[in-house]
Every structure is written in C-alpha cells, then in structure tokens.
Image: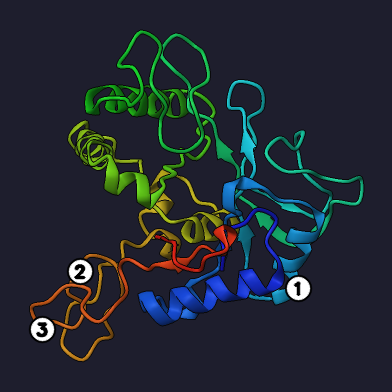
C-alpha cells in the first residue's frame, strides 16, 4: 500500500486487511473509506463499491459557507461541484453514502480547512496554537448548533496529531467545554452512528432512547481481543500490546531500495 490518490481495488482491500490484521479492528466495524489526499474519481468510487464492504465514503470537501447538505447517497451523483477529486457526468453510485467534509470557518468569516485547522488570520504563523484551535472549534460548533444543525465533523490526521500534540490537547479542551456548557442535546457519534440515526431520526426526547446513539464503552475485560484504541481491552494491564503502531515501508522511488519512510 502506497497511500496514493484514486486508489485501486488492491490498495483499498490492502488497507482493509491491514486495519484488521495490524490494528485489530474487527472487519465488521470497517464500513467507511476516505481517499488518500481526498483524490477520488469515478474509477476509485467504483472500486470501493465493487468490494461490497463499505457503506460510505467521506472524501468530498464541502464549503459550509456555500452549501449546507446533510450526508446523502450517491444515487444521483454529488450534490455540489467536485473539488478535491474529479467527477464525470456518469458519477453515480446507488446505495453508497457520502459524508461530506464540511469546511471550518474562521471567526472573520473566511474559510479555514476541512481537516486539521490551519493557522487563523492574525494568529500564529505556520502552526496554530492550542488556544487558536479551540476558538476555531467553538466558533464552528456554535455556527452549526445555532444554524441549520448540520453535523459538525471532527476530521484529523493521526500523524499530525502525533507531531503537533497541541491539536489533541485542544480537542480535549473543546470536548470538555461542550460537556461543561450544558448542551444536553449534543451527541458525540461516529459516522456509522450518524447514518443509523438518519435511517431512524428522532427528536431530542426520542434520541435519549434511540439505539443508534448509544454510548458504547470500550471493552476492558479479560478475554477480549486487544485493538488499537489506546485502551487496555483485554484487562492485562497493557495498552495496545502486540499491535503495530509504527510501520516502515520501502521507498522504491529512489531506486536504491535502502530508503524507508513511515
């Protein structure tokens, strides 16, 4: 696997098997796909659908300022102009959901990014600070909450979260602010839960009993299988033991077969 744009079926299946084999993620829980570099086209979406493994794709940036669409199926193609990838007039994939990546908006009304907030106008140069990230997240949450109530997605690159730990600290602070601010009608859900709720939508009172919004706690008892989630799943006092956390791949582009990247 090379993390290439518009991936082939082989790349898609390889990533699927790697998540199960090396990270311990059960296959039945791997139901969505995001294209490397958000580079998608007709062929790559057809490859995803041909595997019959995925319920949804989440690779299409969508400007929150210009279009407010909930997740939708690709039965009739994309709801907005394709930007990161390319779409032909035949770009239709019945039954496959698309969960858009809504762009973040800065406090001055300009667009920021869809993943990993960029530096804000007038802020730190190069890499945003923890406080700047928290302000961006709060501003966007309130925009969604007080507006059309579109789902507010949190989209992260794991590698950037490792090299820029202030991003994780900011996300934790933001989550604590949500809990401490008394928003009792706000749910932190996975993409899978979001689609289940859309299949059976409920109001505020009904959502308290909607199984799609159940808060499933990680398994921590002995006898469970360890998965890569930062939790001691099998209750032996160790976290994520036996799983691959960093992998090194040979970079064949240099020709000497001796250069590696992670």
Q: Using the rendered image of the protein, determine whether residue 107 is visible from the camera's viewpoint.
A: yes
* Quadrant showing the N terminus: bottom right
| Image height of 119 relative to 183, above or below | above
* Residues under numbered marks 3 and 2 in contact, where contact means CB atoms less than 8 Å apart: no
Which numbered disc, 2 or 1, marks the residue that appears first in the sequence? 1
* Quadrant showing the C terminus: bottom left
- The CA distance from mark 2 to mark 1 is 34 Å
| Residue found 46% across the figure and 41% down from its top | 153
Q: Badge 2 is on which residue? A: 231
Q: Badge 1 is on which residue? A: 50
* Residues under numbered marks 2 and 1 in contact, where contact means CB atoms less than 8 Å apart: no
| Image height of 188 relative to 81, above or below | below
Query: Where's residue 162, x and y in %?
Result: 28, 49
Task: Please tell me which residue lies in front, 95 or 19.
Answer: 19
User: Residue furthest toward the front?
Assistant: 256
Q: Which mark is residue 236?
A: 3
Q: Using the rendered image of the protein, determine whether residue 188 is visible from the camera's viewpoint.
A: no
Density class for disc 3 (Cα within 10 Å; few <14, some 14-19, many ≥20) is few
* Residues under numbered marks 1 and 3 in contact, where contact means CB atoms less than 8 Å apart: no
| Residue found 50% across the figure and 24% down from its top | 147
- The CA distance from mark 3 to mark 2 is 11 Å
| Image height of 262 relative to 237, above or below | above
**Label 1 element class:** helix
Which numbered disc, 1 or 3, marks the residue that appears first in the sequence? 1
User: Residue furthest toward the right?
Assistant: 89
Q: Give the number of callouts.
A: 3
Which numbered disc, 3 or 2, marks the residue that appears first in the sequence? 2
């Amino acid at each position: 696997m090379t993390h290439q744009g518009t991936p082939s079926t082989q790349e898609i299946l390889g990533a699927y098997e790697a998540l199960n084999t090396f990270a311990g993620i059960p296959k039945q829980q791997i139901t969505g796909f995001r294209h490397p570099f958000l580079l998608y086209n007709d062929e790559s979406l057809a490859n995803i659908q041909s595997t019959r493994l995925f319920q949804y794709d989440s690779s299409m940036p969508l400007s929150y300022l210009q279009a407010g669409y909930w997740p939708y199926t690709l039965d009739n193609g994309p709801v907005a102009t394709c930007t990161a990838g390319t779409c032909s007039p035949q770009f239709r994939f019945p039954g496959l959901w698309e969960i858009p990546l809504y762009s973040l908006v800065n406090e001055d009304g300009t667009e920021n990014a869809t993943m990993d907030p960029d530096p804000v106008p007038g802020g730190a140069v190069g890499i945003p600070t923890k406080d700047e990230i928290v302000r961006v997240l709060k501003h966007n949450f309130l925009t969604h909450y007080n507006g059309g109530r579109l789902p507010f997605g949190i989209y992260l690159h794991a590698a950037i979260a490792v090299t820029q730990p202030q991003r994780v600290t900011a996300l934790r602070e933001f989550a604590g602010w949500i809990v401490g601010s008394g928003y009792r009608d706000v749910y932190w859900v996975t993409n899978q839960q979001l689609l289940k709720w859309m299949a059976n939508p409920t109001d505020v009172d009904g959502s308290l009993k909607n199984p799609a919004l159940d808060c499933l706690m990680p398994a921590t008892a002995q006898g469970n299988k360890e998965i890569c989630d930062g939790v001691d799943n099998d209750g032996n006092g160790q976290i994520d033991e036996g799983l691959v956390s960093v992998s090194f791949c040979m970079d064949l582009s240099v020709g000497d077969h001796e250069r590696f990247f992670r």
